[in-house]
Image (cartoon, rainbow, N blue to C red):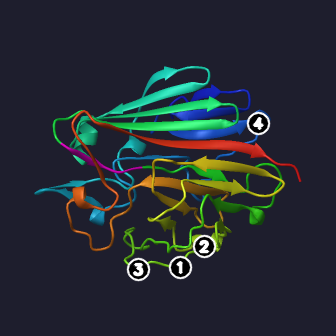
Amino acid sequence: MSELVSIASDKLTARINPLGAELWSLADADGREYMTDADPAFWTGHAPILFPIVGMVRDGRYRLGDASYAIPKHGVARHSHFDVVAAEADSAHFRLGDTPETRASYPFAFMLDVLFRLSGATLQVESRVTNLGDQPMPFSFGYHPAFAWPLPGGAAKEDHRVVFAEPEPGPVRRIDPVSGLLLEQSFSSPVEGDTLVPTAALFEADALIWDQLASRSVRFGAPGGASLQITFPDMPMLGIWQKPGANYLCIEPWQGIADPIGYDGDFRDKPGVLTLAPDEARSFRMGVTVTQETA
C-alpha cells in the first residue's frame, strides 16, 4: 500500500492514498471517523476517482470511430498511482498523467489534478481534467465517497436521512444486475419531497441514480448526531449506493453514467460525456462539511 498523505485543520484530519488519489479517512479532532470502515465482507473501496468513465461500458469495451478499447469499471484513475505534486499542512495536490497503461484503455494525452484542502470543518476537493493532446478528448468524471453509516455521534442508523437541496420528484434509474448497464426504464423515486430515508432494502437492486438532478448539494445525517453537507456544484448527476447491510453509504456526484443497455454508439455521443478541446481544462468540485448536533 502507498504511504498515506495526511493534511489537517483545527477541526479535521484527512488521509489520502496516492494510489487513485483516494480519500481514505476523514476524522474530527476527537478521532471520530466519517468515512467507511472498508469492511472486506462488503467493499474495500473508500472514495475512488472515476475517470474517464463512470460505471460500466457494454461488454467492457467502448468505441471511438472504427476502434474499440477495453476499459475497467469506473475507468483508469482509481487503479493508477498519482504523483504527489505538493503536500502542505492543510492541503495536498496529486497528479496523474497518461502512461502506456492508461493509453491502452484511453488513447488520449491528459492530465488529472486532484487537490484536497481542509479549512475548519470543511474538506474541499477539486479535480481538474486537462486535454494535453491535439485532438478533442471525450470523458466523464465522478466522485465515489463512502461515508460512515451510521455517522459518529450516537444517532441510530435508521434515523439517518439524505436531504436534497431541492425537491426531487423525478424518477430514478437502476442498474441491470447481470450486465452492470443502465436499465432502459425509469422507476418511481423513493424521495419524499426533498428527503430520502435510506435503508438496506433500497440497494438490493444496486444504486439509486438521478440522471436529471435539480440539487447540487445534499445533507446526510440524523437529528442529535453528526451530519455532512456535501456540495457538488459542477456535476448534474448523482448515485447513492451501498452493499446492503454495510456500514457506509456512498453519495456519488457524477458527470457521466453507465452505458444504457443496448448502447452501441460512439463514446463521444454517449449521455453524460463531455469533450475538451486541445489545451482546454474542466474542473469538478466537491465539498464535505462536518457538523455535530446535540440532542
Single out the mark in the foreground, 4 or 3: 3
> With respect to residue 137, does 90 lie above or below?
above
Q: CA distance from mark 1 to mark 2?
A: 12 Å
Of marks 2 and 3, which one's residue comes earlier in the chain? 3
Circle 3: residue type? Gln
Circle 4: residue type? Gly
Instruction: Tell me, yes or no, whether the two marked residues, 4 and 3, touch with CB atoms within 8 Å.
Output: no
The disc label shown at residue 185, or none: 3
Q: Residue at x 70, y 36 (%)?
A: 121
Quadrant position of residue 220 = bottom right
> With respect to residue 5, does 173 lie above or below?
below
Residue at the disc numbered 4: 31
Of marks 2 and 4, which one's residue comes earlier in the chain? 4
> With respect to residue 208, does 43 lie above or below?
above
Q: CA distance from mark 2 to mark 4?
A: 31 Å
Q: Residue at x 76, y 41 (%)?
A: 32
Q: CA distance from mark 4 to mark 1?
A: 40 Å
Residue 217: percent from the left, percent from the top? Answer: 58, 53
The disc label shown at residue 202, or none: 2
Instruction: Tell me, yes or no, whether the two marked residues, 1 and 2, touch with CB atoms within 8 Å.
Output: no
Residue 138 located within the stretch drawn in magenta: yes
The disc label shown at residue 108, or none: none
Circle 2: residue type? Leu
Q: Is residue 147 visible?
A: yes
Single out the mark in the foreground, 4 or 1: 1
Q: Element under label 3?
A: loop
Whether residue 167 sits left or right of residue 209 in the image: it is right
